[in-house]
Image: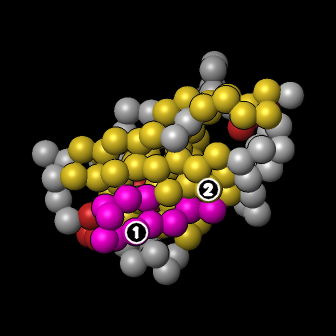
Amino acid sequence: QVQLVDSGGGLVQAGGSLILSCVVSGRTFSTYAMGWFRQAPGKEREFVASISQSGAVTLYADSVQGRFAISRDNAKNTVYLQMNSLRPDDTAVYYCAASDSLIVLKRRPNYWGQGTQVTVSS
């Protein structure tokens, strides 16, 4: 059974930074494309960023391009989301996700973390 445990959310002022982490267990981490999604109150869940199995390819939503950075450490079974220059509209529950490919990941991830709340105050 694959498990994703995400953490690192919290309350931060606008302009601040946070780093989210997601630890994966249950299968070889390096076989998964990984990503982050978010869901704000009253809105649908949306794609934020993704990274290929080797880490060579990264994709970002336009709204976070240049502010967020996704990375992974295959030795630690962990994917990270470094979030800089945070804005109030970044407030959401952030979910880690995993799939066998980047294409599938963006459309319909196979596995989800439980979510971690990020709140950005103005």
Helix, strand or loop at mark 1: strand
Question: Seen in the image, is 5 located left or right of residue 43?
Answer: left
Kindly identify the residue that appears in the image at 33 percent across and 57 percent down. Answer: 99
Snapshot colouring:
secondary structure
Question: Seen in the image, is 58 located left or right of residue 112?
Answer: right
Kindly identify the residue that appears in the image at 43 percent across and 46 percent down. Answer: 96
Name which residue type carries label 1.
Asp
Kindly identify the residue that appears in the image at 71 percent across and 47 percent down. Answer: 17
**The one of 19 and 106 positioned closer to us in this rendering:** 19
* Image location of residue 82, percent across then percent down: 62, 56
The numbered mark, 2 or 1, whose residue comes first in the sequence reads: 1
Q: Is residue 122 above or below residue 113?
A: above
Q: Is residue 13 above or below residue 53?
A: above
* Image location of residue 119, percent across then percent down: 67, 28
| Residue behind mark 1 | 73
State yes or no: residue 70 in magenta: yes
Q: Is residue 71 above or below residue 41?
A: below
Helix, strand or loop at mark 2: strand
Q: Identify the image quadrant of residue 92.
A: top right
Q: Where does the C terminus fall, quadrant-wise?
A: top right
Q: Residue furthest left?
A: 1
State yes or no: residue 38 in magenta: no
Give the main secondary structure of the magenta stretch.
strand
Q: Could you tell me how far apart the alpha carbons at marks 2 and 1 are, in whole angstroms? A: 13 Å
Q: Which span of residues is magenta-colored? A: 69-79
* Image location of residue 110, percent across then percent down: 30, 48
Q: Where does the N terminus fall, quadrant-wise?
A: top left
Name which residue type carries label 2.
Gln
Q: Which mark is residue 106?
A: none
* Image location of residue 18, percent across then percent down: 64, 46
| Residue behind mark 2 | 82
Kindly identify the residue that appears in the image at 46 percent across and 50 percent down. Answer: 21
